[in-house]
Image: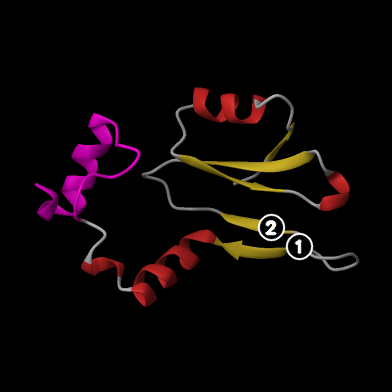
Amino acid sequence: MSSFRCRLRHNRLLRRSASNENSGSALVSRVEDRPRVGLWPLMLRDILPTIPIPLRAPHPAAQVDLHAVLHRIYDAGGYEDYIYSGTPRPPLRADDVAWARSLAPSLD
């Protein structure tokens, strides 16, 4: 997934992200490029992207597979023991609740 460039001014970035009904976003910038950033919109049902994390010049960006990182943290942290109790915050949309229940039937 490629990023698009935008400017961080008067919360335009947050409004743009919210208007697309994203579940979240990954935002990355090089200090010398600020306020320009790379933004990856994230949707709950999509596989998380691999994104470039800037390193100091002259090194190229490191590629970080967010999907793999999430799974490693989930497995190492023992989240399966308690993550599915209670209602998610922020709450899921109705169609996402049905989708989540299809993956974790114990949510009923």
Q: Position of residue 54 (x, y in %)?
A: 76, 59
Instruction: Give the quadrant of residue 91.
Output: top left
The residues colored magenta run: 85-108
- Identity of the residue drawn at 41% across and 46% down: 46
Q: Is residue 41 above or below residue 58?
A: above
Left or right of 7, for residue 96: left
Q: Position of residue 4 (x, y in %)?
A: 69, 37
Check disc 2 and report the residue beneath it.
Answer: 52
Instruction: Give the quadrant of residue 15.
Output: top right
- Identity of the residue drawn at 49% across and 41% down: 24
SS class, disc 2: strand
Left or right of 4, for residue 32: right
Give 82 or 7, whichever is nearer the viewer: 82
Q: Is residue 56 above or below residue 12?
A: below
- Identity of the residue drawn at 43% across and 38% down: 23
Q: Position of residue 45 (x, y in %)?
A: 36, 44
Q: Is residue 105 located in the magenta-colored stretch of the structure? A: yes
Residue at far bottom of view: 76
Q: Residue flagged by tag 2: what amino acid is it?
A: Pro
Check disc 1 and report the residue beneath it.
Answer: 61
Q: Is residue 9 located in the magenta-colored stretch of the structure? A: no
Q: Position of residue 66 (x, y in %)?
A: 52, 60
Label 1: few (<14), some (14–19) or many (≥20) C-alpha neighbours in 10 Å: some
* Total numbered circles: 2
- Identity of the residue drawn at 74% across and 27% down: 9
Left or right of 52, for residue 86: left
Give me the disc on residue 80. Answer: none
Label 2: few (<14), some (14–19) or many (≥20) C-alpha neighbours in 10 Å: some
